[in-house]
Structure formats: C-alpha cells, structure tokens
Amino acid sequence: MGQKHQSRRATRLDTTAPPRPTAARAGGPDRVEGRSTEVGRQEQARSLLITGARAVGDPTALEDAIGDLVMFGGTAAAGDALLASRVATGLMTEELDQLYAHGWQPADVVHVVRRDRGVRVARLAAAVVMEHGLSQRAPARAPLEWVAQLESMGSRRLADVPATPGWNVVGHIGSGLPLWESWSDVLTLIAQWLAVVPMERLLPVPSSWPARRAVASSPRSGGHDPKKLVTIRALLAKAEASGFAEEAETFTAKAQDLMTRYAIDEVLLADPGDGLEIRSRRVHVDNPYAATKAQLLAAVGRVNHVRAIWNDQFGTATVVGLPVDLDLSEMLFTSLLVQATKSMTEASSVARGGHRPDRAPSFRRAFLLAYAQRIGERLSEAEHTAQSQESATRGADLLPVLARRTAAVEREFERLFPITTQSRATQVDARGWNAGRAAADRAVLARGQVDR
C-alpha cells in the first residue's frame, strides 16, 4: 500500500474519572458531599467503573476493582441492585458518542474491539452499538451506509428491530458467564472506549443527522446496470470455488475486464455539470498478516482507479474513489483474498524441491506480498486491454473523462490525508516470495475462455 496515516492518540483515562467518593461500600451516610443518596451512589458507581477501567492490564488491580463493583451491587437496596449496570451503560453510551464525534463508524468500533480485545468483548460492543443506533432512530435518520453497518451486526433489518426502553448491559452480565468475567468484559470495553483516537470523518455523525433522512436509492452505488454486477459476482464466485489455479485466474481476469468496462460506462453516464461524486469508506482487514493483505487491496485499488491508505493501529484501510469503483474494488479484493489464502495454505503445506512444508509466518507473509504484486500486474494488463478497446470504440471523448476521474480522486485523497508516510521495504522469505508469484503467475489469462 505504501502509505500509512499518522494520527495522534488522545487518551482520556486520567482526566475523565471524578474523585472517588468517600462514602463506605455499605452502610454509608445518606448524603455524599451534600448530594442526595441516589446521586451520590451514581457518582460512586461511576468512580468504581472508571477505576476498574484504569486497572485493565493489571490483573491484581482489576480483580480488586471487580470485587468493589460486586460488593457495591450486593449491598444495594432492592430497587438499586442494577445501578452499577445502568451507570456502566450510560458511560459506554457517552464514550460511543465521543468515538462517533471523532470520525468512527459502527463497523469500525466492533472491528477494532474484536482485533484488540477478542470476540466476546466485541459481542458486547456490538450490542451497545446496536442499542445506541436504535435509540437515535438510525433506521429513519442515519446515512444508509451507517444503517447497513448496523444491520450487518444482526440477523434482521434494523427497521424491524424495536428499541429496548431502559436497556443496559445487565443482559451481558447475566448471560451465563461468571460474574467476574462479565464485569471484566464491561471494564475492558470502557477502557478501550475511554482512549479516543480520531479517525477521518467520512459520514455524518448522529448529532448532525436530520429528523428524517433524505430519500436515497442505496447505501452503495448499485450502478446503472445491476445485471453486470451479478455477472461479475458470479465470475468471482466461480474463481473462489475453483480447485485449479489456472481456471481461477481466468475467471478473475474476465471479472476485471467486465469491471473496467462497467466502470467506464458509469463515468460516461455521470452528468458533467454535477461533478464526479467521490466517496471514501473504510475496509476492515483481519489478522493475521493484515498489513500484508492490505497490499492486495492497494493493488486492486490501483487497477480500478481507487486510492488506498493503511492504518496499522486499527487494521483498517481507507479507500477513496467513485462509488462504483469502490464497490468493484472491494468485491474483487474479497474474492482475491479468499483465493490467495487458499493458495497460501496449499503452498505452505506441500513439500517442494526437497524442502519440508513451510508454515512459518515469514513464508506466508512473503507469499501474500508476492501474490499481491503479481496479481496487480496481471489485473493491470487486463484493465489496460479493456480500456484500450473501449477507447477505440468510443473515440477521443473517453480519455478526458478518465483524466477528470483521476484528478477528482487525487484531490479528495489529498484533502483527507495531507500527511502520509511511505512504508519501508523489508526483506522477505525467498521461498515464500517465489511460491506467491508462482501461484499468481500460473494462469494463462485468456479472455476468450469465458463467455460474457
């Protein structure tokens, strides 16, 4: 990918916590510094939660903090037993608002929590994110891409999911996990969200949503010819399912050919007077070898006139381009990643040339890097051929339109990322590199082998 975005960490762990109340855990006075008992206990619960969040990473301190929370709930009156859970829910909602204000989106939140804290804490994060969206009437107010992210976290359309009045994390705390582990998850999530690191703001945030969203056709471009998208998806599905590298490469090359022609059609259909609609979105890349996998995304993006930049801290790539180009690039990247992973697993499990199978991370990383580079070269060949044929068919009017697209993408990329750094080249495992190029290079990319 070659570029990384630099962002500054703004940690608020040391500034958010109020002073710890002096009331005893049990049997404390009816007033805490002149406040009513209820308000005082809310302050005490909040202080215990902040203290617990700051203890994450120190097992002994965390155990003490959880013990305080359990004792706090155990000594509460009957109507107050869930106070700590309600305060925790409110605190997480506040911090989620802060994340959104700093450019985060629902899918970013869950992806980073899963990457840093594991699947179980990510499920808790997804529950909080979903309830927040419902409380903000996201189905009627949020950008459709925001709604799509929320819907990806559940099994139903968001519009069919009712908000839960008074929802709080007690459902997680009572979900069958030991009480200690449940509170550990809650405190871990609070700690994660208390450290706000800004992202680029790519969509309107909840505080700026209108009372009702303007009518829009789709969260993604959809394009003017959905049938072509169906054909492209079918070709990529065949490539993923194929057990033969040559056949898979043929299907992939044909898909790139159709993608180039489809994208050109979309650019030409755009109204020149309205300007080109340049969008940005984040692509989440999972471990292992996330940064190396991102090289494949960058290679696909370059061929399809999309700029990409990698954020290693979050495991996200931001891609900038026309909506149709973003859709096609993401679709092709997902398919190629499946194919690359399959080829890498096979290559690292088979002994070749008298060598034992090599499952070392250095081998696999080199394999993916070489695969990305060579696939990029071959896709570029397919794209160049298709574009040349389109230029011959459409005449001299095509080149200025394509140049206008490139310039518009560059302007938006520079606006979003005025400061970038180049990633350094590193030495790679020679066997892995050679195996990766061979896997990407075995095919004869004969366009005529697949019918349109």
Image (cartoon, helix red, strand yellow):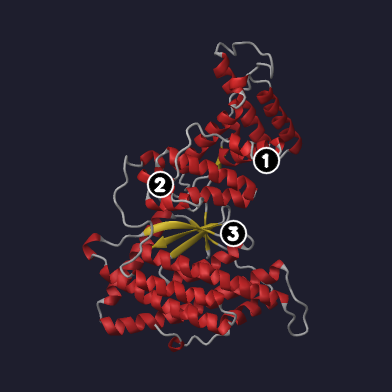
Tell me which numbered mark, 1 or 2, is placed earlier along the sequence: 2
At 65% from the left and 17% from the top, the residue drawn is 22
Badge nearest the viewer, 3 or 1: 1
Instruction: Look at the numbered discs 1 and 2 and tell me whether their residues touch, using CB distance below 8 Å.
Output: no
Question: Which quadrant of the structure image shows residue 272?
Answer: bottom left
Within 10 Å of disc 1 (Cα), the crowding (few <14, some 14-19, many 20+) is few
Residue carrying label 2: 159
Residue carrying label 1: 176
Name the amino acid type tagged 3.
Asp
Residue 82's spot in the image, x, y percent?
60, 27
Residue 165's spot in the image, x, y percent?
47, 33
Name the amino acid type tagged 1.
Gly
Residue carrying label 3: 286
Q: Nearer the viewer, residue 284 or 226?
A: 226
Q: Nearer the viewer, residue 122 or 383?
A: 122
Tell me which numbered mark, 3 or 1, is placed earlier along the sequence: 1
Name the amino acid type tagged 2.
Ala
Residue 185's spot in the image, x, y percent?
65, 40
Judged from the image, the secondary structure of the residue bearing numbered disc 3 is loop
Q: Split into 4 quadrants, where in the image is the C terminus?
A: bottom left
- Tell me the distance, in whole angstroms, between the alpha carbons under discs 2 and 3: 29 Å
Please, is residue 134 above or below residue 367 in the view? above
Badge nearest the viewer, 2 or 3: 2
Please, is residue 130 above or below residue 302 in the view? above
Residue 422 appears in view: yes
Question: Which quadrant of the structure image shows residue 293?
Answer: bottom right
Tell me which numbered mark, 2 or 3, is placed earlier along the sequence: 2
Q: Which mark is residue 206?
A: none
